[in-house]
Image (tube, coloured by chain):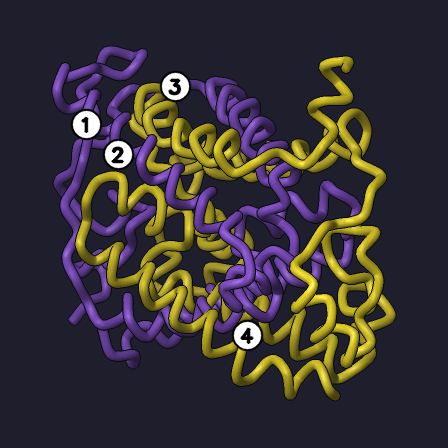
Chain colours: A yellow, B purple
Amino acid sequence: MHVIDWLRQPWPWYISGPLIGLMVPALLLMGNKHFGISSSLRHICAACLPAKIPFFQYDWKKELWNLFFVAGIFLGGVVVVYYLADPSAVQVNPALTAELKQYGITDYTHVNPVELFSWSSLGSLKGIIIMLGGGFLVGFGTRYAGGCTSGHSIMGLSTLQLPSLIATICFMAGGFIMANLILPFILRL
Amino acid sequence: MPTGEMNTDFEVRSLDTICNNASTIDAPWYYNIKYLFIGVIFGIILVKTEVISWFRIQEMFRLQSFHMYGVIGSAVVVGMAGVWLIKKFKLKTFAGEPVDFSKKKFNRGQVYGGLLFGFGWALTGACPGPMFALVGDGFAVFLVVILAAVTGTWVYGLLRNKLPH
C-alpha cells in the first residue's frame, strides 16, 4: 500500500497518543512553552476587547506563539482535507448508533453529525444550546479551571501536578453527567 | 484583593506574577513560525485520530470505546517521560535557557470550572484544540463555537473577582 493511502486511514490511538505526548517536551525545548491551547482564547480577548478588565490587562504580544500554534492547528485541518482525507464513514459503537438514531442522527459521513453542526441548525433551539451554549461553557470553564484538556490533562499531568489531576477528573465527571443525563433531553428537542 | 496577586492559570504561567523565569530573550515575531509548524502537525494528528469527532467524544463519555482513553493515556505517559528526561539530564532549550517548571496551587476553580468545561466538552464534542482543527477540516460553523468560547472566557474575566476560587 502507498504511504499516503496508509496515512489516509484513521490513526490508531497508540500512534497518535504518543505523538501528542511528544508535543510537551518539544514545546519546552523549542522555547520554554507550556503545552496549552485554551489560553489562546484569553489572548484573543486581551487583543480584541480587554475593556479595562484586569484579567485581560497584559502584554498579549508576548504570548504570540500560542496564537501561531492555534493557527497551525487550523491549517492542519486544511492539510488533511487536501492531502489526507478519508472518504469512508466514521466507525462508531453500534450502541451509540442505535441511541443517536432515536434523535434523528444517522449521517456518519463526516467526523461530526451534520444534523447538529451546520449553519441551518443555528436557527434551532437544539443547535443554539449545543453550539453556543456548549462553546460558552468550554470557554468559561477552561479559564475558571485554569486550563483545558491540553493544559491540564496532558501538560499538567505530565508534570505531576495534583491540581491538574483534580481538574481532569472534573472534566470527565462533567462530561459523563452531560452526555448521559442531560444531552438526551437536549437531543430530543 | 487585586486579581493580579493570584495566578489561577495553568497555561499562562507568567502573566500575573512579578518574578518568573520566562524567556528574557526578545525574539522577533517570525521566530514564532516554528510554533505554526508544530501546530500543523498537532492539527493533523487531532483530525486523523478523530479526536475532533463529536461521535468519539460521545463514545468516551458512555464508555463505549477505549480510543480516547488510549489517546490521552498514552500522551500523558510519553509527556511524563519527556519531562522526566528533561529534568534528569537538565536539558536546556534551543536558545540555551534552563527549562522552567512552575508548581501550581489548588483552587476551587479547578472543580467548578472543570465541571462546566466537561459539560461544554460533551455538548460540542470539542475542547479548544479540536475547535480550531474542525474549522480547517471544513466545519466552518465551528467559528461560531469558537466565538462563543471566546465570549465565555471574556465573561469569566469580567466575573472573576465575584467567583469562588
Which residue is at a point 76% across and 28% down the rendered structure image?
A84
In the visual, does A50 lie left or right of B114? right
Could you say whether the residue bearing mark 2 is in a helix, strand or loop?
Answer: helix
Within-10-Å neighbours for mark 1: few <14, some 14–19, many 20+: some
The residue at which mark 3 appears reads as: B27
The residue at which mark 2 appears reads as: B80
The residue at which mark 1 appears reads as: B84
Identify the subunit bearing mark 2: B
Q: Nearer the viewer, residue A181 or B37?
A: A181
Q: Is residue A33 above or below residue B135?
A: above
Could you say whether the residue bearing mark 1 is in a helix, strand or loop?
Answer: helix
Q: Amino acid at mark 4?
A: Ala
The span from disc 3 to disc 1 (Cα, nearest Å) is 28 Å
Q: Amino acid at mark 2?
A: Met
Are both tags, 4 and 3, on one chain? no
CB under 8 Å between callouts 2 and 1? yes
